[in-house]
Image (cartoon, rainbow, N blue to C red):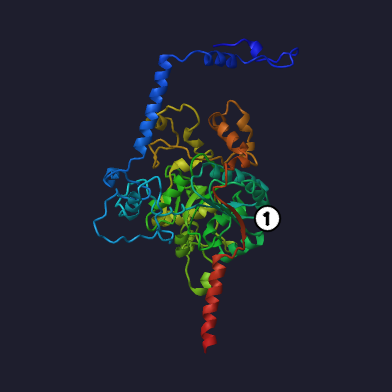
């Protein structure tokens, strides 16, 4: 039945609302005589109600009629009748209170007692639904980065941001830096108030004098590379700067960023041979006599087994020489560069730390492994191997055919799958300020400019999860080089016999 709008609106000219149509209809029905069909309906309903009451008051003659149910959560078995003349021993509940069944007027006392005394069911364990123990915390991905000056920290912040964007595991950053870089990075990392995973940021602040002193204790190394003494040569001493509690680390140059999960790179450590101490990309197709062929590797990204490098005593020191403890590197340096010349320094070393790394790994191949080009998409000599964004349905074979600079390499005929981009050799203070990015005709810009723009512009606050799923810890560590610790221990050992005498 429908009603006109006048029944729903209040009239301004009426002091009381109009009578309800429902009330009028009900009054008409009330005045009608009772018909036969209505009487039959009432009698039927009354009969059903009486039947239900009678049945509900009946007690089951045998408790076994209830034996078909079982409560899985409470681990109760089907009810069993008690043997005759058996004493009842009431069990205690798990919380320590005695079980005292109470009579319930709505149920049979027999049923209550049977339920209390029912034996515990042996319920089989269902695989996939039981948690036996709390899962162990995942192993963190450990990075060691080097940043001196605000410009270096500017690029390094983008690298750190990309790591947190894609990481599926907790992350540790061990950053060798100066005060300026620490201040710059600390301000940004603290914007992550609700991290998705645990984050540890530990700064190892070094002064220029600290670094110069360690290089002087080594005795023979120097560099004329643009990376300089501060940022470059410290890559040879990461295993001495970080504490022994840090056994492995990934090093990446600051002019790079990830576009995939760094856990995939960390997983490469599990495939190391027992003797391996370092992995980095190698380019056997490259050669340069002027550089002693140091361009056959790239120290821009390295997997460092720090514990192994410490055991090998990679770099020399006056402390080691005084104790008669030889280091690995000096013999390799002399074999490639000759004996130190005027001033006691090796001559003709090119490409900074990479020249020294090449002297070490080329003459000690058992400690070295090749790292896939997937993790070294270099814009310098390799032109990113011709890779770029777009054409997302291209298969592996077609992708491999489009590559450049892979002939006579470990990846000949294979598709290189970019996971980390390295924008080196670009003529700018910071790679993202390179003028070529705005040139529509530039091949590198056509292929990778959108990726640069996205990762540079990604906001730190976007790294916050919906709730805190991890913690952020920021620390500053006092640096004591390993050769200094060695000298202190050696001195104590020399003094102890004298004290005992």
Residue that protrudes farthest toward the bottom in the picture: 501
Q: Is residue 472 left or right of residue 127?
A: right
Disc 1 packing (10 Å; few <14; some 14–19; many ≥20):
some
Q: Is residue 44 above or below residue 107?
A: above
Q: Is residue 353 left or right of residue 273?
A: right
Residue 273: x %, y % from top left: 37, 55
In-front residue for pair 349/280: 280
Residue 428: x %, y % from top left: 64, 39
Residue that protrudes farthest toward the top in the picture: 4
In-front residue for pair 347/206: 206
Q: Mark 1 points at which residue?
A: 179
In-front residue for pair 195/180: 195
Residue 392: x %, y % from top left: 45, 28
Residue 413: x %, y % from top left: 37, 35
Q: In this view, does 273 lie to the left or right of 4?
A: left
The answer to whether residue 177 is seen in the rendering is yes
Q: Is residue 403 above or below residue 102?
A: above
């Amino acid at each position: 039945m429908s009603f006109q709008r006048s029944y729903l609106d209040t009239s301004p000219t009426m002091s009381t609302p109009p009578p309800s149509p429902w009330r009028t209809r009900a009054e008409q029905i009330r005045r009608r005589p009772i018909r036969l069909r209505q009487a039959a309906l009432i009698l039927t309903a009354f009969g059903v109600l009486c039947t239900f009451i009678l049945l509900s008051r009946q007690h089951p003659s045998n408790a076994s009629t209830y034996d078909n149910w079982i409560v899985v959560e409470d681990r109760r078995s089907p009810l069993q009748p008690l043997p005759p003349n058996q004493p009842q021993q009431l069990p205690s509940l798990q919380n320590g209170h005695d079980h005292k069944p109470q009579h319930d007027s709505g149920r049979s006392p027999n049923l209550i007692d049977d339920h209390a005394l029912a034996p515990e069911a042996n319920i089989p364990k269902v695989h996939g639904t039981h948690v036996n123990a709390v899962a162990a915390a995942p192993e963190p991905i450990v990075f060691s980065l080097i940043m001196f000056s605000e410009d270096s920290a500017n690029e390094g912040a983008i690298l750190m941001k990309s790591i947190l964007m894609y990481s599926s595991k907790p992350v540790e950053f061990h950053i060798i830096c100066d005060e300026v870089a620490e201040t710059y990075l600390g301000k940004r990392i603290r914007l992550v108030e609700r991290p998705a995973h645990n984050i540890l940021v530990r700064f190892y602040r070094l002064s220029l004098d600290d670094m110069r002193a360690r290089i002087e204790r080594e005795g023979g190394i120097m560099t004329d590379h643009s990376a300089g003494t501060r940022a470059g040569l410290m890559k040879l001493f990461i295993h001495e700067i970080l504490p022994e509690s840090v056994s492995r680390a990934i090093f990446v140059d600051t002019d790079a960023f990830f576009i995939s999960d760094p856990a995939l790179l960390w997983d490469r450590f599990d495939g190391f041979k027992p003797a391996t101490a370092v992995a980095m990309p190698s380019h056997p197709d490259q050669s340069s006599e002027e550089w002693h062929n140091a361009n056959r590797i790239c120290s821009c990204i390295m997997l460092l087994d720090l514990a192994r490098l410490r055991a090998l005593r990679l770099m020399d020191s006056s402390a080691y020489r005084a104790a008669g403890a030889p280091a690995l590197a000096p013999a390799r340096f002399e074999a490639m560069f000759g004996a130190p010349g005027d001033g006691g320094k090796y001559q003709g070393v090119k490409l900074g730390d990479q020249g020294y790394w090449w002297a070490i790994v080329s003459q000690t191949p058992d400690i070295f492994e090749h790292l896939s080009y997937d993790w070294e998409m270099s814009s310098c000599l390799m032109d990113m191997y011709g890779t770029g964004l777009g054409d997302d349905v291209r298969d592996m074979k077609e992708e491999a055919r489009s590559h450049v600079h892979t002939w006579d390499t470990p990846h000949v005929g294979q598709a290189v799958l970019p996971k980390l981009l390295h924008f080196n050799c670009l003529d700018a203070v910071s790679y993202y300020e390179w003028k070529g990015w705005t040139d529509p005709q530039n091949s590198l810009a056509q292929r990778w400019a959108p990726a640069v723009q996205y990762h540079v512009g990604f906001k730190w606050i976007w790294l916050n999860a919906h709730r805190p799923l991890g913690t952020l810890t920021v620390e500053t560590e006092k640096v004591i080089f390993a050769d200094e610790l060695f000298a202190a221990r050696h001195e104590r050992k020399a003094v102890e016999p004298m004290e005992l005498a």
